[in-house]
Amino acid sequence: MGKLSLILFGPPGSGKGTQAKLLKQSLGIAHISTGDMLRERVASGDTLGREVSGIMQSGGLVPDETVNRLVEDRIQQPDCEKGFILDGFPRTVSQARLLEGFLEGKGLRPLVIHLEVDYNVIIARISGRRQCPTCGNVYSAKANAPDGSLHCDYDGTTLVTRPDDREEVVRERLRAYDQQTAPVLQFLKETGVTVWDVRGDGDSPLVIARGLEALIRREREKWAGGRNGLGGAV
Ligand SMILES: [Zn+2]
C-alpha cells in the first residue's frame, strides 16, 4: 500500500493529539504536530520563537508562511517514508491550498478525519489542566485540590496553568478555530476530498482510536482495490 497522508481535524482540546499518538503506534507512521513544532521553537528562544510565543499567549494564530515552511520541511524527513499524520495543519484555507498542491505533486491522496467534540466539554477539559513548570508533566482537572495549590507527584513543584490553557484564551482559540478552520473543511469538500466526521467524546481514547483505525484500513483497502476516484471523491 502507498504512503498514507492522514489529516486529523478537530478543535483544540478535542483529543486529536492523543489520537495521533495512538495511530502513530498502531500504523507505524510519523506524527506531525504543528503545536509541538511551534512550542519547540518557542523553547529555543530565538527570534522566530519569541515572535511565536507572543502570538500563542494571546490566543492568536501563527502566520501561514511560518507554519508552511516548518511543515513542508518536516514531511520530507526520513520517518515520513511510510506516511504521516498531520495534527493541527492545515488550519487555514491558504495552508490547505499549499498542502493540496504539495500532496498532489507527490501523488498522495489525503485521508481526512474530523473529530467532533462539544465545546463545553473542551473548555472544562483544557481550563482545568495544570502543568509542572519543572518536569512538564500535565495534570487533568480531576487531580486538582480545592484550593488550587496542587503539587507535582514527581518533584513537588507547584503546578501552574499554561498561559494558552487559561479559560479566556481557550475561548479565543475556539473562536479562531471556528473562523479559520471550519472553512478549511468546506474547501476540502469542494475540491472533492471526503471528510469523515467522527465523535471525539463519549468513548475512551482507545475505543475512539480503534474506530479510526478500522475506518482508515477500510478506506485504504478500497483505494488499493483500484477504485480510482479523484481526490477521494465518493
Ligand atoms: Zn514535576
Image: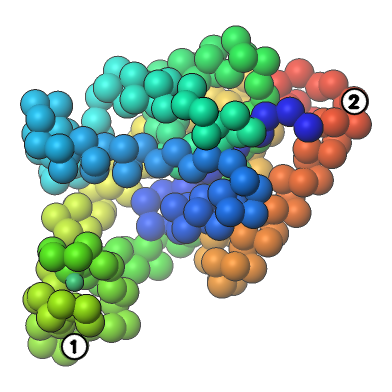
Measuring from the top left, give residue 151's x and y in whole percent.
Answer: 14, 81
For mark 2, give the secondary structure: loop
Kindly identify the residue that appears in the image at 49 percent across and 37 percent down: 86
Measuring from the top left, give residue 174's x and y in whole percent.
Answer: 32, 49
For mark 1, give the secondary structure: loop
Q: Is residue 25 visible?
A: yes
Measuring from the top left, give residue 129's x and y in whole percent.
Answer: 26, 69
Labels in figure, total: 2
Q: Residue farthest to the front?
A: 78
Q: Nearer the viewer, residue 82 or 160?
A: 82
Answer with left or right where residue 226 lies relative to residue 31.
Answer: right
Task: Check disc 2 and give the amino acid type.
Answer: Gly
Look at the numbered discs 1 and 2 and tell me whether their residues touch, using CB distance below 8 Å. Answer: no
Task: Check disc 1 and give the amino acid type.
Answer: Ala
Q: Is mark 2 within 8 Å of ligand 1?
A: no
Kindly identify the residue that appears in the image at 47 percent across and 58 percent down: 18
Q: Which mark is residue 226?
A: 2
If the picture is divided into quarters, which one holds ligand 1? bottom left
Q: According to the image, label 1 marks what residue?
A: 145
Q: Is mark 1 within 8 Å of ligand 1?
A: no
